[in-house]
Image (cartoon, rainbow, N blue to C red):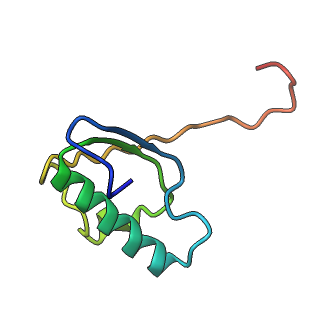
Amino acid sequence: ILRKSTEHSLILIDEFGKGTAPASGIAVITSALQRLAEIKCKVVCTTHFLEMFSLCLLEDCKNGIKAVQMSIHAPESNDDEA
């Protein structure tokens, strides 16, 4: 992805860093997203490494990076109805 991406690329990454140790995963995803921001391609990336933002490893709105967080609240219920 890093070698072939251009400013015209759209990259979708789901659970980037899954299966890695936290420190390794954070390092890899931070570096990769910084490089993709330099290329100026469009990226949608999901990850469970929220520390990237709390540790200021990726700055929101710098180099075109926009961080958003989504959470879902599913009330506990014994009903089978959705």
Q: Position of residue 63 (x, y in %)?
A: 12, 52
Of residues 69 and 58, the one nearer the viewer is 58
**Left or right of residue 32, residue 35 in this image:** left
**Left or right of residue 77, residue 31 in this image:** left
Of residues 67 and 77, the one nearer the viewer is 67
Q: Quadrant of the C terminus?
A: top right
Q: Is residue 34 above or below residue 28?
A: above
The residue under the point 68% across, 35% down is 75
Q: Is residue 65 above or below residue 49?
A: above
The residue under the point 49% across, 57% down is 16
Q: Is residue 2 above or below residue 54?
A: above
Of residues 66 and 20, the one nearer the viewer is 20
**Left or right of residue 65, residue 27 in this image:** right
**Left or right of residue 31, residue 38 in this image:** left
**Count of picture labels:** 0
The residue under the point 55% across, 78% down is 21
Q: Position of residue 76 (x, y in %)?
A: 75, 38
Q: Position of residue 54 (x, y in %)?
A: 31, 66
Outermost residue, top side: 81
Q: Is residue 60 above or below residue 24?
A: above
Of residues 5 and 61, the one nearer the viewer is 5
Q: Position of residue 32 (x, y in %)?
A: 33, 63
Outermost residue, front side: 4
Place residue 26 in its image quadrant: bottom left
